Amino acid sequence: MVRVESEIGSGVNGARSKAKRLLADPEVTTVVVEHKDRLGRMNIELVEAALSATGRRLVVLDDGAAEDDLVRDMAEVLTSFWARLYGRRCAKNRAKKALEAAAADG
């Protein structure tokens, strides 16, 4: 059986319902992605290890690995900075909403 899932979303954002359902389904034995960075921008090796530990695998059709180490390193640094900035903004918004909710209740 083949199941195809298509989802528009960032590889940095974890709020991706279709990807979560697909990865959580133990009947899915092979996950195929076009580009590794569309599944996750960082720590994709952890996803591969988790799939492997349950007898499943990840297949990447276009590895797209940068030939030059400097280019790859710069991409990783920029991704890390962007994720940190995005995380701070989300945390700030969550804290603001929590304070507003507490004020409304109190």
Image (cartoon, helix red, strand yellow):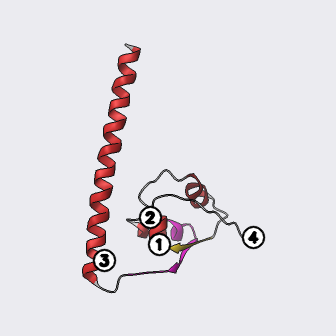
Q: Are marks 1 and 3 in contact (CB under 8 Å)?
A: no
46 vs 37, nearest the viewer: 37
Mark 2: amino acid: Gly
Question: What residue appears at the point 29 percent right and 85 percent down from the top-left corner?
Answer: 68
Q: Quadrant of residue 102?
A: top left
Q: Is residue 69 left or right of residue 13?
A: left
Q: Which residue position holds label 3?
A: 72
Q: Is residue 87 left or right of residue 4?
A: left
Question: How far is mark 2 from mark 3, CA to CA?
Answer: 15 Å
Question: How far is mark 1 from mark 3, CA to CA?
Answer: 14 Å
Q: Which mark is residue 36?
A: 1
Q: Quadrant of residue 77?
A: bottom left
Q: Dot 4 lies on which element?
A: loop
Question: Around disc 2, counting alpha carbons within 10 Å, would you say few (fewer than 14), some (14 to 19), or many (20 or more)?
Answer: some
Mark 1: amino acid: Lys
Q: Which residue position holds label 4?
A: 1
Question: How far is mark 2 from mark 4, CA to CA?
Answer: 25 Å
Q: Nearer the viewer, mark 1 or mark 4?
A: 1
Question: What residue appears at the point 46 percent right and 80 percent down from the top-left corner?
Answer: 63
Question: What residue appears at the point 58 percent right and 59 percent down from the top-left corner?
Answer: 7
Question: What residue appears at the point 44 percent right and 69 percent down from the top-left corner?
Answer: 37
Q: Is residue 25 left or right of residue 44?
A: right
Q: Magenta region: which residues?
A: 49-65
Identify whether 38 is placed above or below 89: below
Q: Quadrant of residue 58?
A: bottom right
Q: Which residue position holds label 2?
A: 40
Identify whether 35 is placed above or below 66: above
Question: How far is mark 3 from mark 4, CA to CA?
Answer: 36 Å
Question: Around disc 4, counting alpha carbons within 10 Å, would you say few (fewer than 14), some (14 to 19), or many (20 or more)?
Answer: few
Question: Around disc 3, counting alpha carbons within 10 Å, would you say few (fewer than 14), some (14 to 19), or many (20 or more)?
Answer: few
